[in-house]
Image (cartoon, rainbow, N blue to C red):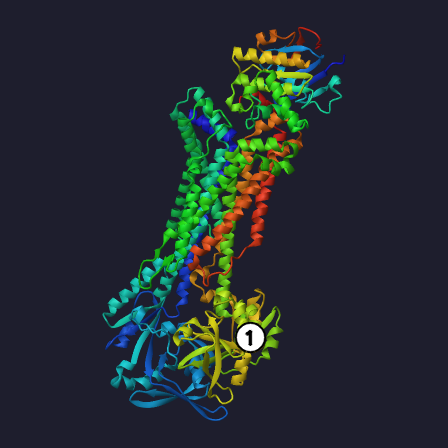
Amino acid sequence: MAPLVIANAITRCFGTGASAVDALHSTSCSIVPSAHIAIVGSSGSGKSTLLHLLAGLDQPTSGSIEWPALADAPRLRPGPIGVIFQSPSLVPALDVVENVELPLLLAGDHPSAARLSALAALTRLGLEALATKLPDELSGGQAQRVAVARVLAGHPRLMFADEPTGQLDHASAVDVIDALISASIATNAALVVATHDPLVAARLQDHWTMRDGVLTTTGVPCSA
Amino acid sequence: MLGLTWFRSLIARRTGRIAAAAAGVALAVGLLASIGAFVASSKATMTARAATRAAVDWQVAVQGSADPTAVLAAVQTQPHVVAAVPVGFARSPGLTSTTAAGATTTQSTGAAVVVGFPADYRTRFPGSIRPLVGSDNGAVLAQQTAANLHAAPGDTVSIARVGLPAVDVTITGVIDLPQADSLFQTVGSPIGAQPTAPPDNIVVLPLAQWHQVFDPLVAAHAELVSQQVHARLDHMLPGDPSAAYTQVAAMAHNLEARLAGGGAVGDNLGATLAAARSDALYAQILFLFLGLPGAILAGLLTVAIAAAGSTRRRQEQALLRLRGATLRVLVRLGAIEGVLVAVIGSVLGLALGAIVGRAVLGASAFGNDTATSVTWAVAACTVGAVIALSAVAYPAWRDAREITVNTSRRSVARTPAPRWLRWGLDVILLAGSAVVVWLAGQNGYHLVLAVEGVPTVSVSYWALLGPALLWIGAGLLTWRITHLVLTRGRRPLRAALRPASGPLSDTVAATMQRQRRPIARAVALVALTVGFAASTAIFNATYRQQARVDALLTNGADVTVTPAPGANLSPGSTATLRGLPEVRSVETIQHRYAYVGTDLQDLYGVNPATIIAATDFQNAYVQGGTARSVMAELAAKPDSILVSAETVKDFQLQPGDLLTLRLQQTSTKALVDVPFHFAGVAKEFPTAPKDSFLIANGSYVADKTGSDAVGAFLLNTGGQHRTDVAAAARNAVGPGPAITDLDTSRQIIGSSLTAVDLAGLTKIELGFALALVAAATGLLLWLGLAERRRTFAITSALGATNRQQAGFVWGEAGFVAITGTIAGAAIAWALSHVLVTVLTGVFDPPPETLAIPWGYLAVVAASALTATAVAAQLALRSSRHAPIELLRESP
C-alpha cells in the first residue's frame, strides 16, 4: 500500500542571515494509511513545523515531500488532507454549520450537498444542537470539536491536529481526542497529532519524538 | 513604567492603527485650520474691496451758516483723511439747449442740479466720473441729460436760476456719474427720506465757474444752494468688515463732534462696509454649511477607524484584565493612546493646513494676524484632541467599565440593533429637517439680516438646522436601510454578490450579515462623505453659475460694446465685431428712452428669436411663463411689449392693453406716439435698470423711430478670452464706445461675497472632500479587512484559492463602495436642494436649476472606486500572505 506522505531530508529555516533559525533539521519520514501517530516533544521542538510541512501548509527550505497515495486528488486542501489547529480556527462571522460546510464549498461542492454533509458530520459528533451557534458562543472544547467535524465533513484520508487540546481543560481535551479518533476510524483516515500532553499521546498507537528540530523515532514506521 | 512600556509598544507594534487614527484627526485639524485661513483671508478681501467701492468715502455737508472753509480745514486735519475738496450743489428750475444739428431746435428739461467740482476732482476721486464724450475740463452734462437736451460738446446750454437771469454755458463733454445715488444723497437724512433716484438732469461745472453762477443766488435763495466737503481716507482698516465698519463709523462720529454742528457726515465708506458685514457673515455661514460637515466627517471617520481596531483593542484589554490590570490602569492606557493620536494628528493637521493655505491662498498662517492665527490653530487642535479622545480613549474607558473579559474577547457577537435605530431617530431628524426647510422657504425669511445704520447684523441660525438634520438623518437612514438589507435580504444580497463571489456568494453574504453593524456604519460613512463632497461641489458650481448670471445681467454678455450717447454705431459694425478673433456671435439690442405718461423709461428693442441664447435670458427674468414662451409671444405680434412689474402696477395694465409710448423720431428729434400692446411682464433684462424698463421688438421700434441705431453690441466669446476680445473691440471701434467685459463687471458690480468668489473655499473643501472620500472607502475598508487577517488565515489554511479569497474581499468592498456611493448621490441631491433653499440670500438671482459639476463628481467617484480597489487589493495581498502562525496564537 502506497504511503500517504513521504518526506525526504526536509529542512525548514525561518529568517535569514544572523537571525535565521533552523526549526527543522534534515528529516525523513512517511505515513501509511490508517496510521495513528502522536508527535510529541516540548514547546519549540519543531512538532508544529513538521506537521505543517506534512500537511502542505508550508514549504520546506530543502528536501522534498510527496503524497503518493493522494496523487489522484486535484488538490490536498480542501480534499484528502484535513487540519485542526491549536487555537480556535472557526470563521467568527459564520455559524457552526456554515463553518463546517466551508471547506466543501471551497472544494466546489454544491451548496445543498455541502450543507447535508456538514449536518451529517455534526450529527456524527453529537454537535447538531450547536449548528446555528456562532463560534464566539461556543466553549473552547465545543469549538475544537466543531473543527474536527469540519475536517470529518470533507472525508479526509489524512488528518493532522496541531496541539488540538493545548488550550482546553482535561475533560474537554478527552472529548476532542475522542472525537478525533472516532472521526479517523469512521473515515479510515490516518491521524497525526502534535502534542506535548502524554495523556493525549497515550491514546495514539505510534509516537514520534521531536527534540530541537530533530525527529527521533520511538515507533514505526518512521526513519530519521 | 507600564505607561511608558505601553507607549513604546504602541509606536513599535501598533503603528498602522495609530497612524490611521492620527490621519483622521489630521484631516479634521487641517480642514478647520485651512478654513480658518480662508475665512480670515476672505474677510480681509471683502473689506479691501468694499473700501475701493466707494468713490468718495465721506460727503460732509456744510450745515446752516457754518463756514465751508472751516469745515474743509477740519476735515483735512482729521486723522486718516488723505484728500478733502469742496464741492458745490445748486438746484435749477430747468435747462434749455439750442442745437444746430440740421435744423436749429430748442429742448428744455425740468428741474436740474448743477454741481461744482474742483479741477482735480476726478484725479482725487477715481471712479466718481467717467468721461464719455469730449473733455471734462469745462461744463459737462450727465449722459441722460445730454440725451434729453439732444446736446453734444460745443452746444450751449442755458441754466435757469430762481430770481436771477439764466446763465449760458458751453458744453465741453458728456460724462457718466457711476455713483450718482450716493453723490446726490441727502446727507444726514434717514434712509426712508433719501431720494429714490438721482436727478434726471445734471450739469457739472468747474468749481470756480459754479461759484460765479450760484454765489449770487445764496443771498436770496440759500435753500437752493449747498456745499459739501468730499474726503478720501487712507483705508488702513481692520481685516474684518464689522471691525472696519465700527472704526470708520466711529471716525465719522468723531468728525461730526469736532464740527460741532457745522457739518453732517455722509459716510459712504461706512455704508459699503456695512454691506460687506453681511457678506462676511454669509461667508462665515458658508463655512458652517460647507466646512463644518467636513470636520465632523473627519471626526466620524476617526471614530470609525479606531472602531475598526476595537476587537483587537478589547482583546488586549481582556488580556491585561486577566493579568490583574485595574479599571484605572486600563483607562490610563487608553488615554495614552488617545493623547498620542491627538498630538500626532494635530501636528500633521496644522502642517497640512499650512501647506493647503500656502497652495490655495498664498499664506501659510491661519489668519491675518498672530492672534487670529493662534486662535484658529488652538481651536483646530482642540477639536482634534476631542476627536482623538472620543475615538480612542472613551471606548477604552467604556469597554473597561461595561464589558466582561469573556465578551471583550469576542469578535462577532449577536448584538441588538442600536438604540437610535429602534427609536427611529433618523425619521425624526428627517421630519425635523423638512419642517425647517419648509419654514425657510416661506416669504419673509432672511438668513442674514443687516439693517442699514444698525451696528449689529443678525443671522437666523435656526435655518442651519435644515441641512444639518437632513445630513445626519440621511446618514442614519442609510445605516438603517443597509442594516435591514443585511439582516433580512440575504437572498438578494447573495444574488448581488454572485458576480464577485461566485459559488461562495451565500457564505460571503453570511459573513456580511454577521458583520452588518460595522458594514452598515462603513456604508453610512461613505454615503455621508460622498454626499458632502458632491453637495459641496454642486453648491459651489451653482454659486459660480449664478455669479456669472448676475454679471451677465449687468453686463449683458461676455463683452459688451455700448456706443456713446449721440454717437451712432450702425448695425453694420456687427460684422466688424463678429470678425474679431474668439468672437462666436454678436447680438445687437436697441436702447431708447420712452415716455410712459410722464415717466421716462428705458426701452430695449430686441430680436426675440435670438436674444435668449445671446444673453443667457433666464426663465426667472419673466413672469407668467418661460423666457421662451414670452419671447415667442413678443415675436408673434410686432407691436407687443414686455413691461416691468413696477410699471404694470403703476399703470394698472392688463394683458392686451394698448400702451402708447412717446418715442423720439430720429430725423425730426420730435416725440411721436407709438402704439404697443402689453404682452407680458419682465422682471429683469440684461443691461437694464432694476426698477422700470420696457422690452419691444427691435424691428418695430426701428420702423417707428426711423433708426436702427444700436444701443449695445453683445459679444459671445464662449466664456473665454474676454479681456483679449474687449481690447480687440476697443481697437476696432475706437475710443468712443464703452467696452465692458464680464470679468471686470463681476469685480465691480457683484457683492463683496461674489467678488471674493468661493474659489479658495471650493479648492480647500473639494480637496479635503476627496481625501475624506478616499479615507472613508479605502482606509476604513482596509483597516476593517486587515482586522480580519485571522479569518483569511483560516480560509487559506482550509485551502481557499486566491480567487476564492478575492471573492470574500471584493464582495464586501464592492457592496460598501457601491451602496455607499448610491446613497451618497441621493443625499447630495437632497442636500444641494436644501442648501440652495436655505442659502437663497447668497444667490442673486436665485438659480433655476442646480449646476452639476460632472467633472469633479467623476473624480469623486473615481477616487472612491480607486481607494476601494487599492484597499481591497492590499487586503487581498495581506490575506494571501496571512501567516499560518496566526492560527497558533490565541485570538
At horizontal 34% and vertical 58% (from top left) the residue drawn is: B457
The vertical placement of B229 against B79, above or below, is: below
Q: Tell which of B489 and B505 is nearer to you.
A: B489
x and y percent of residue B622 in the render? 48, 68
The vertical placement of B339 against B841, above or below, is: above
The vertical placement of B323 against B643, above or below, is: above
- Residue B366 appears anywhere in the view: no
Is B863 displayed left or right of B369 in the figure?
A: right
Is B646 displayed left or right of B724 in the figure?
A: left
What secondary structure is found at the residue carrying circle 1?
Answer: helix
Residue, disc 1:
B635
x and y percent of residue B373 in the render? 40, 49
Q: How many neighbours does mark 1 have within 10 angstroms: few (below 14), some (14-19), or many (20 or more)?
A: some
Chain where mark 1 sits: B
Q: Tell which of B741 and B301 is nearer to you.
A: B301
Is A17 displayed left or right of B3 in the figure?
A: right
At horizontal 39% and vertical 75% (from top left) the residue drawn is: B650
The residue type indicated by label 1 comes to Ala
Query: In terms of image quadrants, where is residue B498?
Result: top right
